[in-house]
Image (cartoon, grey):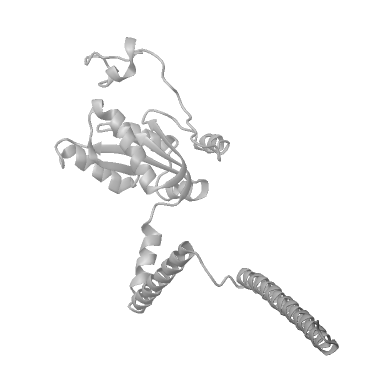
Amino acid sequence: MQSRGSSNRLSNSAFESRVAGLMLAMFASMASIYVASRLWQDAESREYLVKELDKRFRQNQSAISVDDTLRIITCREQRKKLSALETQLAEARKEGFVSNQLLKKKDTDPKKGLLAVLGIITTFGRKKNRDAIRKAWMPTGATLKKLEDEKGILVRFVVGRSANRGNNLDREIDDENRQNNDFILLDGHVETPEMRPRKIKSFFVRAVENWDAEFYAKVNDDVYVNIDALGTMLSLHLGKPRVYIGCMKSGEVFSEPTNQWYEPDWWKFGDGKR
């Protein structure tokens, strides 16, 4: 049996224990709320920082790719080369070299824009034909140059060389060219009837290499050409790609060497030689 004083002491002790437990629980809850709040704030801060960094990166483009870096390096190298060339050019100008060369090139460079380059295919022993063409439709002297400058049509006779280089045939052509200055001399081509197709090809190659024209044409030295009509007709086809104007022959290809129209490469034309 307990006394009344003992009972009071037990009650006070239990009450104090409950209060202490309640206070501990309150402190634990408050601590948990504080820690959670700090963690939430940190997460928000990190998210804000990430957004700010991303925005500033997009605005400033402070980082570049490998390709961009290589382009920058290449541009710097080209700038250095350009600077060195400008220095060399300035030194050359001081010596008077560049200006003289440019004047000489301006007077002698034939590669300029033309409407057409017209080659008249001729050969040895055809001077009468050439003289007839000069009198009939091909200008001479300053008038030939005027045709080139005003109408954009350059006309020249086309001839190769003799198998015996430097003989009378070559000298006659050279003399005629010195007098009229209206030849394209194919030094690498030997004049023979069977090599005529190659001669025409060589002419076109030479013409393309030396003159920038819209059209390249050839005629034989027994043909009359109306220059004005030719220029008008060609002008109608300007701007069209890969234009071919002329006769596409359809007929027998002669394989007999004795025939006047013998074709050495007749076998390239298919069965029936047609």
189 with respect to 57 (left or right)? left
Question: Is 186 positioned to the left or the right of 222 in the image?
Answer: left
Q: In which quarter of the image is residue 240?
A: top right
Q: In this view, does 244 lie above or below 9?
A: above
Question: In the displayed image of the protein, which residue is found farthest to the front?
Answer: 1
How many labels, in total? 0
- Horizontal arrangement in the rendering, residue 12 relative to residue 78 (left or right): right
Regarding residue 92, the answer to whether it shows in the image is yes
Q: Is residue 65 above or below residue 151?
A: below
Q: Is residue 122 visible to the viewer in this orientation of the structure?
A: no
Whether residue 63 sits left or right of residue 90 in the image: it is: right
Q: In which quarter of the image is the C terminus?
A: top left
Identify the residue at image location x=46%, y=67%: 69
Q: Position of residue 241 (x, y in %)?
A: 51, 37
| Furthest residue in direction bottom, as rendered | 5
Q: Nearer the viewer, residue 183 or 35?
A: 35
**Where is residue 233, by image quadrant?**
top right
| Nearer-the-camera pick, 38 or 198 | 38
Which residue does the image show at 44% across and 52% down from the upper left? 112
For the N terminus, which image quadrant?
bottom right
Instruction: Using the rendered view, name the quadrant where residue 119 is placed.
Output: top left
Q: Where is residue 246 in the image (x, y as percent from the top left)?
A: 46, 27
Percent of width and height locating residue 250: 41, 16
| 156 is higher (above) or lower (below) than 129 | below
Q: Where is residue 260 in the image (x, y as percent from the top left)?
A: 27, 17
Is residue 199 or residue 166 the one in the foreground? 199
The residue positioned farthest toward the top in the image shown: 272
* Position of 125 relative to 31 (above/below): above
23 or 103: which is nearer to us? 23
At horizontal 38% and vertical 56% (from top left) the residue drawn is 109
